[in-house]
Amino acid sequence: MKHTLQFLFLAVLVLTMAVVSNAQITSAASGNWSAGATWVGGVVPSSGDVVIANGHTVTIDQNVSVTNLTVGGGTSGTLTFDKVARRVVTVSGNITVAAGGTFIAQDAISTTGDLAATSTSITNVASTAGVVNGMNIGTLTGIAAGTTVASFSANTITLSVASTNTAALTGAILAMGYDDTLSIGGNLTNNGTFDMTRGNAAGICHVIFTKAGDQTISGSGTTTRFRSITLNKTAVTNKVIASINVTTSGSNIIFIAGTWEQNAGRLTATSGSIAIGSLTATSCALNIIGSAGASIASNLNVYGAFLLNTTDSLIVGAGTSKIDLTYIIGASATFTKGTVLINGKFATAALTATTINGANIIIDPKGFAAASGTDYAFRATTGTGGTNPFTFTSGTITILNPNSTASSNPELAMSSSVAPNISGTAMFVLGQGVNTVASAAGYRINFNSVVSLNHFTINTGSVGVTLQSNITVKGTLTMKSCGTLGGAFKWKADNYLFNGGAALVTGTIMPDTVRKVVINNSLGVTSSQTLFISDTLVLTAGALTGPFTARVTVTGGTAVRDDNSGLPREFALTQNYPNPFNPSTTIQYELPVNSNVTLSVYDVLGKEVATLVNGNIEAGVHSVQFNAANLSSGIYFYTLRTGSYVENKKMMLLK
């Protein structure tokens, strides 16, 4: 009987411990994860749900596997890693950092020393207190990534990889720590501080998202920071959906499989590039949608898929960076809505299905001028095995500055044997009226015979444009400002708009017969050759001088009522010039009949910031100036309303 009771007692005890180990366990005090005294009931969590209570700091000193993890009780609470060895934390469910809570990577050890040339050790170290074998050596000239502490003494650290440095680094600062790992199988909610990098490259935690389904990143916390994110989610349809500001650095996002979707807040890569996959990993994607934005310190390289469909912006690079869409057959990139600012270049090939159907892309290649000046701003090529046409149906592609070397490659180049589809309201723009590159040689354009542009605008200030091949423009060629026009081939366009603030000359490369010319330049335009205008000459502002003949002339938008009156055939709202602008820009609109017109400007929140036109306006082509000197930099929208016709366009103020 006695033995039976003892057996029953032990069975109950084992069952109770099993229940406790799988139930919620809350911290009882500050301490190491492995210490029983750290936890209520003295049971070290090995599964189930875990809560770090207010006022407690728990240090992860072993590998951990739990279901759900909550850090903080609403006012405080901290979870961090030790500095003894690499730790692996696996959370199969959700992670929640409560308000006031903190979940952080270890703080790296910093020390100073002199690195001897070609040495495998760092000598004269001021102190090796806290240094442990296996620690990572942070970034330092001559020390390769992944180098660790092999051994150490009081004043010397021996490296696991020999240094390639050829000069002593006196007083160099070293940061040392471990690469821990955090695997998340559910959602991450951060209402406090979540920081897996602590601002250095040594004491970091690699974060892996593993669920074969969607996971979310949300919350009200102001710091959600990563050093390295890995998406290993089985298929491209499985997403990590972020709706708050997320900062990452170093290796940023490593795409194995899955989609990172930023639908609000901003994804900021403070250093390095983002590669959407690799040559062997293409089942992945990056989506910037909704009200989200993104900033990438270096390059955006697409092997899988990329989608931009946002009311915000994508900013890439700091001078010689790129959006590169030339990597792998089957990749796709779609720019539907939003503003893209590339400090460098944009490259696509028929390897990649590239579609621009509403976004405004602004490219500034002036960073290449400081190097050799031998690179392009926009280029579309075929690539081996490429079959996808470059498709551009709406939006703008603007090249702000040329390179500086006369022998450099074209700023605007297309050499694909697959004819591009450039149609609708798609427009290429050269220049912003003022050139900011010293001693610039001017813009160069080079297309092969399959290329036909839709609308094209030249606004290069005093800088010239050189044609290295023939140019076909199906829609409107707009001349706002330009230096010397060079090249042996003529423009081929249907409509010509001269819309600047300086006197212009048509140039000999303009054909001698055109359909329509609009002069909206108070200082006028001079025809440098005998010109026949087969349809209409519209004189909105200024005059056309020189030898020309026009079938119908309309002055100041005044109606001439016949079949060839020259009045616009439909309502239209054109893209503002310049765009981006600071602080003023011109907006033009067309009215086929006298109309009651409202033209208003709104910010991204939908608040009206200016009313530019409000009243009855005669039929014709009209323009109005918008001065935003009292507004802050950002995206703005302008809307034309007349009767049942409503059209919206977007512009960008850069101060």
Image (spheres, grey):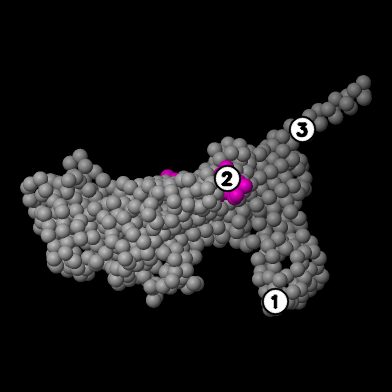
Task: Give the distance between the C-alpha atoms of the residues marked 2 and 3, in whole angstroms.
Answer: 44 Å
**Which of the numbered marks, if any, corresponds to residue 166?**
1
Q: What kind of element bears circle 2?
A: loop
Can see residue 159? yes
Query: Residue at the location (44% across, 63% down)?
Result: 376
Task: Give the distance between the C-alpha atoms of the residues marked 1 and 3, in whole angstroms.
Answer: 59 Å
Between marks 1 and 3 in the image, the one whose residue lies nearer the viewer? 1
Front residue of 610 and 339:
339
Q: Is residue 614 left or right of residue 3?
A: left
Looking at the rendered structure, the kind of residue marked 3 is Ala
Query: Residue at the location (16% across, 58% down)?
Result: 532
Residue 310's x, y, as percent? 41, 47
Residue identifier under label 3: 18
Which badge, 2 or 1, comes first in the chain's sequence? Answer: 1
Looking at the rendered structure, the kind of residue marked 2 is Thr
Q: Residue furthest top?
A: 1
Q: What kind of element bears circle 1?
A: loop
Query: Residue at the location (61% across, 41% down)?
Result: 233
Q: Disc 2, disc 1: CB below 8 Å?
A: no
Q: Residues within 10 Å of mark 3 (few under 14, many from 20)?
A: few
Front residue of 126 and 626:
626
Magenta residues (range): 276-293
**Which of the numbered marks, if any, corresponds to residue 439?**
none
Q: Is residue 627 left or right of residue 144?
A: left
Which badge, 1 or 3, comes first in the chain's sequence? Answer: 3
Residue 427 sits in quarter: bottom left
* Residue 366 to residue 84: above or below: below
Residue identifier under label 2: 282
